[in-house]
Amino acid sequence: KSSDDSSLGRTCGLLIIDEVHLLADERGAVIESVVARLHRLVESSQRQVRIVGLSATLPNYKDVADFLRVHRTRGLFHFGPEHRPVPLEQKFIGINAIKPRFRYESKMNEVCYDIVCDSLKRGYQVMVFVHSRKGTGDTMKAVAEIARKRNELESLFITKGTESNGAAHSRYADRAEKSRNKEVREHFNNGMGIHHAGMLRGDRKLTEQMFADGAIKVLCCTATLAWGINLPAHTVVVKGTDVYNSEKGKNVDLSILDVRQIFGRAGRPQYDRFGEATLITSQEAMSRYLDRLIREVPIESNFIKQLTDHLNAEIVGGTITNISEAADWLQYTYLFCRMVKNPLGYGINARQIESDPTLSTRSVELIKEAAQ
């Protein structure tokens, strides 16, 4: 890229950002950097570029609209729950803490099984979301084991030879048996399936097709299925909310955005009058999730964590040549939008706000800190 122009500005006439709520994710810094650079290029070249941001789970959509420089009356469109083609029934179940851990997991599996069975008895398919690849197989094994103990595996789960799903089972039997994934073969015979990013692409695709055609009734998967693939089910269950964070070295709460995204998979517009979504978590965590859903907690920026990297990229690209330009560039980011709205959340106290209401001084300080 030359210092006076950029291939992005010269060639891009339309920028579409799907899942724009990922601004709150670690990857969100890339979105902020791209949008900030594009806005500066538009202003300097006076060349129009259209930006479209899309999201199904965005609480503070007006803040994101300001970041994208959207005209609030002409370019901002908000569709509430009343626009959902299939109404959604949400349930939250809290389980009291039980020690040791395996007893707590066992109780969670039983609760999950009861929800799955209730749905199957009414003729609906179920998707169960867990938060590790190993957890998909472990959950399906636990569900199958409970079904055997209660003599319900054949009557509720197995599709082979049934009037409603037997034909679908027959269509996929050979392909499932030829799969190199042992779990795909085993779970298929129980009318179940698993889906996660660690599986071969062919096995993932096969599992999606089997579930869509009714060859399997229950699918246990990780959140990758909620984000990347349009595969709905009447009933969706989120089993547990503990997600391991490698950066912090411990389990953290599943993001409320992830919960909303997973819940969005419940209900099939062409088949269902309503969808059902259930969150199973600890009694302690349940109050936090209910609070977040009611209060609609805004998404925040993670740009500060990667400010040094993106500042270096702008300097190398020739779009920033001094501290003043860098501070100006920072004001095009979502970070700046949220610092103005929620200064305390970004370590800016009342005295600093009073002396620096436009946050121009704070912008310079952040740039100097990043440059050191």
Image (cartoon, rainbow, N blue to C red):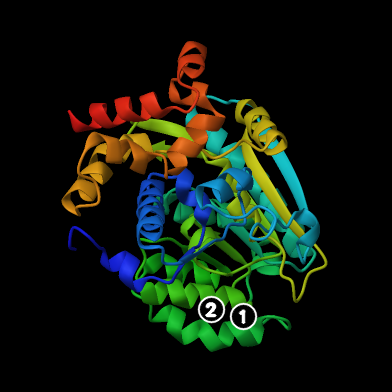
Left or right, 102 with respect to 90, comes to left
Q: Which residue is mark 2?
A: 209
Residue drawn where x is 52% and y is 84% of the image = 172
CA neighbours of label 1 inside 10 A, class few (<14), some (14 to 19), many (20+): some
Locate the N terminus by quadrant: bottom left
Left or right, 264 with respect to 104, comes to right
Q: Verify CB contact (< 8 Å) between mark 1 and mark 2.
A: yes
Picture coordinates of residue 274, whole percent (x, y): 80, 62
Residue toward you, 79 or 179: 79
Picture coordinates of residue 233, whole percent (x, y): 66, 66
Q: Which residue is mark 1?
A: 213
Residue toward you, 301 or 12: 12
Residue drawn where x is 77% and y is 74% of the image = 271
Residue drawn where x is 36% and y is 30% of the image = 363
Residue drawn where x is 27% and y is 68% of the image = 7
Q: Amino acid under label 1?
A: Asp
Left or right, 107 with respect to 234, comes to left
Q: Quadrant of residue 41?
A: bottom left
Residue toward you, 229 or 45: 45
